[in-house]
Image (spheres, helix red, strand yellow):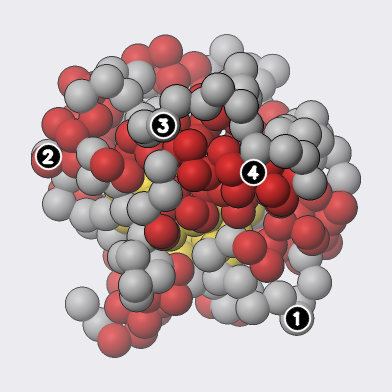
Amino acid sequence: MDWGLQNRIHRMFSPASGNTVMLAVDHGYFMGPTRHLENARATIAPLAPHADALALTRGILRHAVDPTLTTPIVLRVSGGATILKEDLSDEALTTSIEDAVRLNVSAVAMSVFVGAPHEHESLVHLAELVDRGEQYGVPVMAITAVGKELAKRDARYLSLACRVSAELGAHLVKTYYCEDFGQVVEGCPVPLVVAGGPKLDSDRAALELARNAIDEGAHGIDMGRNIWQSEHPVAMLKALRAIVHDKATVREALDILSREKGTPKAKNAPTTA
Ligand code: R5P
């Protein structure tokens, strides 16, 4: 692997834990002004310093993020469909690698739609993006199973989607946590990070998801709604960092959450993850 490419990857992962906490704020590219992300600048500003990377589009990066920010950027470079369409898989590459380099990003990211009507196009686009990324030393993160593909979130499907992405050259893969997640990890030769998906019933559930994913071999999270749709986004992000980087149990993470929220420790919380 070329020096520049390796260096960009290492910017995003903690040398101590080997893991990363990415903050996903790219939802608007197909969902529009998602709840609590209507004013992207206001949502991102307090969170960005606590993230190891920010995952977003060039529009939000240019218009809602201060250029003095040193947090690494994972730039989403695919798009072309919205939630108003039946078929979300009709995406193409929407940002050139030259623009990604101009924006000084640490990685580019795109969705792959395995099993969807535009499976073929999304996989060919992934291979093309890897070729372009390798030319400039920019790693590529494949994102599996977004939108309606979420319905297929099981180990068999996600193993297939993640492995195909790695085979086509993705340097990192973002996927979803599922039962038997270890099987997904085992079949994927590149680091996996997990998304959170729609807001879960509680902060505890999101912390448990992160704990389980790390325990089963994920190298981090790339989480959005379960952070910035939480009532206490910064506290939630700090609690997740403790899980991803410091081996915190769910109980310990809940204590961090309570402390950061300025409320008493969680009562009657189980003592194990
Ligand atoms: C889809 O909109 C994006 O790939 C998100 O970045 C991804 O789903 C992670 O965000 P969340 O944790 O909200 O699912």
User: Viewer-nearest of labels 4 and 1?
Assistant: 4
Label 4: how many residues lie within 10 Å, few (<14), some (14-19) or many (20+)? Answer: many
Q: Which of pointers 1 and 2 lies earlier in the amino acid sequence?
A: 1
Label ID, residue 271 = 3
Dot 2: element: loop
Regarding residue 244, the answer to whether it shows in the image is yes
Disc 3 versus disc 1: distance between alpha carbons?
A: 41 Å
The residue beneath circle 2 is 187
The residue beneath circle 1 is 68
Please give the name of the residue rendered at 36% of the width and 60% of the height, measured from the top-left corner.
19
Label 1 beta carbon within 8 A of ligand 1: no
Dot 3: element: loop
The percent position of residue 103, horizontal first and vertical second, equals 63, 74
Q: In the picture, residue 73 is in which quadrant?
A: bottom right
Give, as a three-letter code, the residue at label 1: Thr
Disc 2 versus disc 3: distance between alpha carbons?
A: 32 Å
